[in-house]
Amino acid sequence: MPEHIKDQIIKVRDTALCNMFDLGMVKAIAVELECPELAAFIDTNTDEYVHFITSGE
């Protein structure tokens, strides 16, 4: 996973506005925070996203 995607995940997480497993809300917040790459990444790499959320790797 690219570092900029990890950084965007952390940016969304740090807002504390949603459960990070609520992919629809994560994508909406990502767009609001001007992180459209994260929203696209979740659509195409859901398993990798979930792995990062659960393991930090």
Image (tube, rainbow, N blue to C red):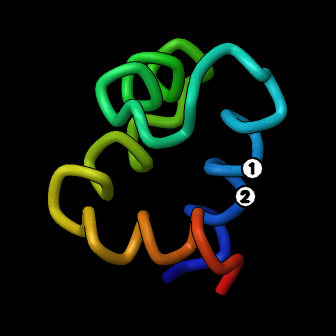
Residue under pointer 1? 10
* Whether label 1 touches label 2, CB < 8 Å: yes
Compared to residue 17, the image places residue 22 above or below, namely below
> Residue 52: x percent and y percent?
56, 73
Q: Which mark, by number, is residue 7? A: 2
At x 34%, y 36%, the residue is 23
Distance from disc 1 to disc 2, alpha carbons, whole Å, reads: 5 Å
**26 or 8: nearer the eye?**
26
Compared to residue 51, the image places residue 21 above or below, namely above
* Quadrant in the picture for the C terminus: bottom right
Side of 26 where 39 appears, left or right: left
Q: Which residue lies furthest to the right in this view?
A: 14
Amino acid type for the residue under numbered disc 1: Ile
Side of 37 where 35 appears, left or right: right
Could you tell me which secondary element the residue under label 2 belongs to? helix
| The quarter of the displayed image where residue 53 is located | bottom right
- Crowd rating for badge 2 (residues with CA inside 10 Å; few <14, some 14–19, many 20+): few
Compared to residue 1, the image places residue 9 above or below, namely above
At x 26%, y 48%, the residue is 40
Amino acid type for the residue under numbered disc 2: Asp
> Residue 32: x percent and y percent?
53, 12
> Residue 54: x percent and y percent?
59, 69
**27 or 51: nearer the eye?**
51
| The quarter of the displayed image where residue 4 is located | bottom right
Q: Which mark, by number, is residue 29? A: none
- Crowd rating for badge 1 (residues with CA inside 10 Å; few <14, some 14–19, many 20+): few
At x 41%, y 20%, the residue is 25
